[in-house]
Image (cartoon, helix red, strand yellow):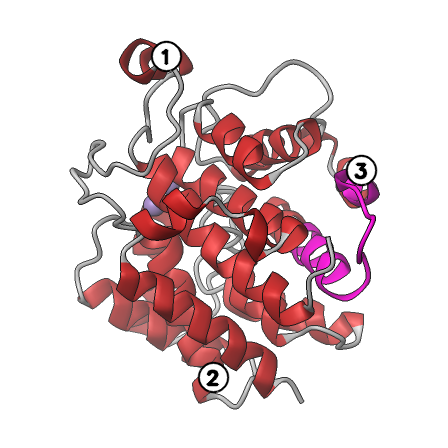
Amino acid sequence: MNATIADRAQAAYLGLAIGDALGATVEFMTPGEIRHKYRVHRDIRGGGWLRLKPGQVTDDTTMSLALGRAILTQGGRVEALACAQAFEAWMRAKPVDIGNTVRRNLVTFRHSGNPVAPPSEHDAGNGAVMRILPVALATIGEPVERVSTAIRAQAHVTHHNVLSDGACDTLVAMLHAVLEKIGAGGTAQDLRHFATVLVARHAEYTFDGKLRDNPSGYVVETMQAVFQAFFATTNFEDCLIDVVNRGGDADTTGAIAGMLAGAFYGLDAIPRRWRRALDPNVRDACLVQAQALLAIRS
Ligand code: MN
Ligand code: MN
């Protein structure tokens, strides 16, 4: 494993889209239903409750791309108002799916013009963390306070919640560690302490117990499934197959595991059949935006 930052950034973005497209087929199914229908679900084939075309992605990827464009338009800065406007325009374009918390807080923004949602204990969904990748790419090497401010600027447009913030902070810290520091010879276990810190801060996130099957959109269950799959496997393909076959919010666990495993294992580790199956316009947009976000860093 000897990938450059650019390679890992592109693999993270491709991993996000591939995990989304792969998982969407089995979103809201139980592991038993998935086993009955596919034995093991391992191919990008579309379908699912959204009746997707093979290779089509959902909100996890398209919100990330919208966020990334807003960051690029702002010269690399993550500004709440620009993020809110980008998400609002994304919602108006009738996306294939949209989370309840995202919809509610964007409708509020439409009327108030205030891009910061009020803090809410009900907003502990996974909608802010699933689209965090462009922020991670735009803030590599920045001081921790600036990273934290950028994370909250995008997250609080729709999810103003400490559990969501904790997941966003942890995932960005892991991505930064992979992109900047963990080079050849690192193992997935080198990232375990980031998850341990999150559990120490919020005990809800404990993930070393029983298998987290059927992870819901609650950010805690989503991240438990992602951590378990990432730490139990040793390559990109196994990690994604593990996480999406748990069912539940499988497009989003797939997207988050995909960005992390993509960054960690690099482009060469992504199976060709998945690269080929992904919508080529999405694939190109992800690759181009990953490069652009790296290039715009101040
Ligand atoms: Mn989705
Ligand atoms: Mn989902």
Helix or strand or loop: what does disc 3 sit on? helix
Residue beneath label 1, please? Answer: 35
Question: Which range of residues does the magenta coloring cover?
Answer: 169-193
Helix or strand or loop: what does disc 1 sit on? helix
Mark 1 closeness class: few <14, some 14–19, many ≥20 residues within 10 Å: some
Quick one: label 2 or label 1, which is nearer the N terminus?
A: 1
**Residue 63 quadrant:** bottom left
Of residue 115 and residue 22, the one placed in the foreground of this image is 22
- Please tell me whether mark 3 or mark 2 is closer to you in this view: 3
Residue beneath label 2, please? Answer: 72
Task: Tell me if the residue at label 1 has its CB under 8 Å from ligand 2.
Answer: no
Query: Where's residue 49, x and y in %?
Result: 20, 32
* Label pair 3/2, CB-CB below 8 angstroms: no
Position above or below: 67 against 218: below
Of residue 130 and residue 23, the one placed in the foreground of this image is 23
Marks 3/1: CA–CA distance: 29 Å
Q: Quadrant of the C terminus?
A: bottom right
Residue 230 has which mark?
none
Residue shown at the point (43%, 47%) measured from the top left: 272
Helix or strand or loop: what does disc 2 sit on? helix
Residue beneath label 3, please? Answer: 189
Quick one: label 3 or label 2, which is nearer the N terminus?
A: 2
Query: Where's residue 217, x and y in %?
Result: 44, 36
Position above or below: 155 against 130: below
Marks 3/2: CA–CA distance: 33 Å
Any part of residue 168 in sight: yes
Any part of residue 152 in sight: no
Task: Tell me if the residue at label 2 has its CB under 8 Å from ligand 1.
Answer: no
* Label pair 2/1, CB-CB below 8 angstroms: no
Residue shown at the point (37%, 49%) measured from the top left: 101
Task: Identify which amino acid the numbered label 1 is placed on.
Answer: Arg
Residue shown at the point (49%, 60%) measured from the top left: 13
